[in-house]
Amino acid sequence: MQQSKPEPGDAIPSACRNCGERLLGEFCWRCGQEAADFHRPLRSLAADFLDNFLNLDSKLLRTIGPLLFRPGWLTREYLAGRRASYVKPLRLYLVTALIAFGVLALWPHRVVRVVVDPPEQERGNGAAPAVSSRDAKPPTGLDRLFGKALEDPRRFAEAFTANLPRAFFILLPVFALLLKLLYLRRGILYLDHLVFALHCHAFGFVVMAVLAPLAAAELPPPLRAALLLSLFVYLFVALRAVYGDSWLAAGLRLAALIILYGTVFGFAMFGLMLFTAYRLQS
């Protein structure tokens, strides 16, 4: 079939410029390319960009409220097919992660404290969580690896913080897999659990973005504990909202999820310490 070609000066082409298929809307139904002509004045392109930005901004405003104050609601809306009005789960995850790790990068050595030989008086006094080679109790070979890397604790903290986004991106599908195992008899698809995991992690990143500057300012332990507790409360309410669990069932599954994911998270953080120390040494 001979492909029809749009005229060179057409503002809105009647055929796709990529595959030549007849256009039925703003996007080609065959190849998916947008039917946009970029051979236009700069002010026209700027107006389109501003329109798209404001559209994303309005979606974000409609999304952030339910994300923060209605646990599980966004997941239910997405799984029910009502998706156009809200930021997509993966994009929401990436946006909140970008904000959280961007804030964390401002004070990496104060939020993630690295202690080579922590004095006894610093233990249990409400200081920021410490990442220590002595706490990990590695064998002699690892002790030498950590010892060399921790000659500059500030540099180690910065490198460790910079690698955190990779660790969370790997942990995300693990979180969804644990949900799949906990609800195995329900026959729920893994991708549905993944949507739930994306929304929960997005909320966690918001908490992280708030917690990081407060931790850098050495916030009181009760306030830090309250922020961390909000993660578990949020997850409990979200489990009931999305999966329809009773109070008891949601509590039991939450406890199992905390134990399982906490164990995986601990190993992941230790592995990240090893990776960071190795990269700094090489």
Image (cartoon, grey):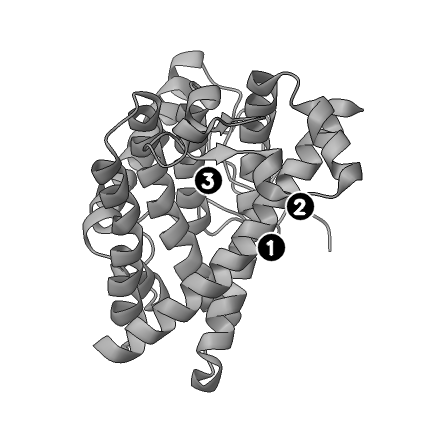
Q: Where does label 2 land, which residue?
A: 19
Badge 1 crowding class, 10 Å Cα cut-off, few under 14, some 14 to 19, many 20 or more, is few
196 to 87, vertically: above or below? below
Q: Secondary structure at mark 2?
A: loop
Q: CA distance from mark 2 to mark 1?
A: 8 Å
Q: Which of the 4 quarters of the picture holds residue 209? A: top left
Q: Considering depth in this image, is 130 or 76 the residue closer to the camera? A: 130
Q: Which residue is the site of mark 3?
A: 94
Residue for point 43% across, 19% down: 107
Where is residue 206? Give x, y as percent: 32, 39
Residue positioned 26% across, 71% down in the render: 240
Where is residue 169 shown, x and y percent of the image? 55, 46
- Label 2 close to label 3 by CB (< 8 Å): no
**Image depth: mark 1 or mark 3 in front:** 3
Q: Amino acid at mark 3?
A: Leu
Query: Mark 2 packing: few (<14 Cα in 10 Å), some, or many (20+)?
Result: some
What amino acid type is highlighted by mark number 1? Arg
Q: Which disc, if any, is residue 30?
A: 1
Q: Which percent across, then down, holds residue 61? A: 23, 39
Quick check: 99 left or right of 6? left
- Of label 2 and label 1, which has the lower sequence position? 2
The secondary element bearing badge 1 is classed as loop
Measured Cα–Cα span from mark 2 to mark 3: 32 Å
